[in-house]
Image (tube, helix red, strand yellow):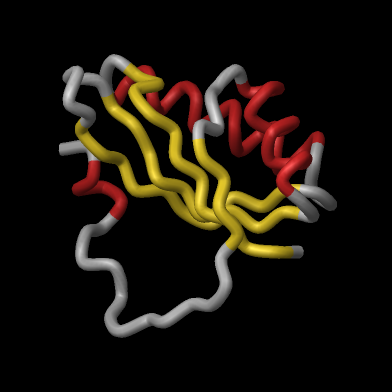
Amino acid sequence: MKTFVIRRKSNWRDASELSVTASVSARVGNEEMPDQVRWIRSYVVNEPDGRLGTVCIYQATDEAAIREHARRVCMSADEITPVADTVVVRDDPVAAEEAFA
């Protein structure tokens, strides 16, 4: 599988709505598409319009698999960029529980 960065812009009103979508996304990836898509992590961002967006890291067989996963979950995949390399300087500074606070 290849690694991709996916930008989803202004998809959710609030953390509660995002949480519901995240549950569906995990189920679809784990149960319906386990050989094609793997969700690694997401960074939740505040959008200029007041909604929430994400920057997601996925592994997938190809861009088409990511688009199909997004379609099944009913969320966007506004930008899909293949990752050329990974450089880790430090672990992520924010725990998952703190991201929605």
Out of 94 and 58, give the one closest to the viewer.
Answer: 58
**In the image, residue 22 lies at what x, y percent?**
49, 32
> Furthest-right residue in view?
35
Q: Quadrant of the C terminus?
A: top left
Q: Quadrant of the N terminus?
A: bottom right
Query: As displayed, is residue 25 above or below residue 51?
Result: below
**In the image, residue 59 lies at what x, y percent?**
65, 58
82 displayed left or right of 95: right
> At 59% from the left edge and 53% from the top edge, which residue is drawn?
58
Q: How many marks?
A: 0
Tell me where residue 70 sits by quadrant. Answer: top right
71 displayed left or right of 53: right
Tell me where residue 69 sits by quadrant. Answer: top right
Tell me where residue 95 sits by quadrant. Answer: bottom left
64 displayed left or right of 56: right
> At 59% from the left edge and 32% from the top edge, which residue is drawn?
25
Out of 12 and 76, give the one closest to the viewer.
Answer: 76
> At 55% from the left edge and 33% from the top edge, which residue is drawn?
77
**In the image, residue 20 lies at what x, y percent?**
46, 22
**In the image, residue 56 lies at what x, y percent?**
47, 48
Query: As displayed, is residue 13 above or below residue 69?
Result: above
25 displayed left or right of 42: right
